[in-house]
Amino acid sequence: MEAISLIGCGRWGTFLGWYAGNYCKFDRVDMYDIPTSPNFIELKENRKNAYLSLSDNMVMHENIEEVLGNEIIIVSIGCQHLRSLAKQINNYNVNSKTFLLAMKGLEEPSAKTLELVFREEVKQDIHVAILAGPGHVQDYMKKVPSCAVIDSYESATKDMLIRRLSSDLIRFYYGTDMVGNQIGAALKNVIGIAAGILDGLEWYGLKGALMARAPIEVGRFIKHFGGNPQNAYGLAHLGDYEATLFSKHSHNRSFGEMLAKGENFGKLAEGVATLKAVKIIADTEGIDMPIAQALYKVVYEQADIKTTLKSMFERDLKKEFDNSVIC
């Protein structure tokens, strides 16, 4: 009997467990979250959440050690909790295990990628990959197909995961840039906040400009850290815009919309912490990030939203492209 493990029982993590058990032919899905977390309690008591019902082959565990024996372990938790989880995992023997990090963000305030954070704390011979790209649980449960990308520094790890997890519901592409895909995936959440603010202001016409300029800014950030700036135009970033900048299911877009309306969203929006990390690094390294810097003033410094966003689009006149170079 072949089993796969899942750490993190939020809406996305629970779906990935359900997907692995129903579309990828794993016989059992071992699921773990902090036993006192609302998500875990709801699933254990009711065997369902607002999006799906657990299948019979999905088993809940209250001890993390019980889910670390399987060869593949999907991790889907809040990004800012990854380091503490990795420290906990390192207390057990996980040599040769494969970890798929299925969340999008940068650690704050270090602005480190999640793969790097994980490897800094799990000091064993492990295999690490990341999952990025579009997709909402609500759409997948309606059997609406989509695409995503899996990337790893190890070709064999990437190939194994893609072959095991691909189906007619999700087609996984082979990533070719771990830095670019992680940064692109993280910063699309930040751009989602900007899109939500424009929705809240009913400045819908500026969303097109935002979509055109944001990948250039993100590509600049990717390039600074040694990645390929063209990955800002791939599935991890631009390819995820519909799900993040337009969808009613997007937490980041909803956070921005409610912020513009003076209301409290009250749920996790990963782009908020990522925004702070980006602002710190952009200032320290001298990276030109006008969208992120304007957002920071609005989100963290309570700057006037309309005035700040207008100033972002009223910067000095310049060419759209410089000799056809993206960044």
Image (spheres, helix red, strand yellow):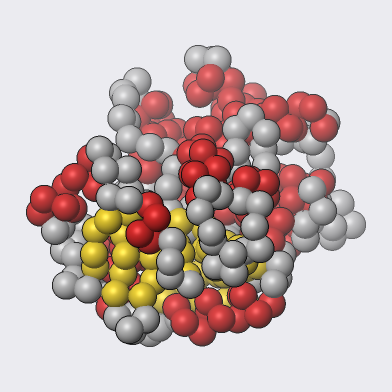
Name the one closer to the observer, 273 or 247.
273
Q: How many marks?
A: 0
Q: Which image quadrant is residue 303 in?
A: top right
The answer to whether residue 291 shows anywhere in this view is: no
Residue at point 33% right, 84% down?
1
Residue at (42, 47) in percent of width and height: 77
Q: Is residue 108 visible?
A: yes
Residue in front for this viewpoint, 108 or 197:
108
Point 71% across, 67% down: residue: 153
Residue at the limit of the structure toward the left, as seen here = 46
Q: How far from the left and from the top, in percent, is residue 10?
A: 32, 50
Q: Position of residue 188 (x, y in %)?
A: 55, 49
Residue 227 higher or lower than 282, as above or below: below
Would residue 326 appear left or right of 124 to someone viewing this image? right
Name the spot of residue 117 as percent of width and height, x first. Answer: 63, 45
Of all residues, the one furthest to the right in this rendering is 323
User: Compared to 301, does 187 lie above or below?
Assistant: below
Image coordinates of residue 141 in percent, x first then y, are 25, 68
Image-based side of 140 in relation to 204, left or right: left
Q: Residue at x 55, y 43 (%)?
A: 87
Residue 27 left/right relative to 218: left
| 197 lies above or below 155 | above
Q: Residue 19's image quarter?
A: bottom left
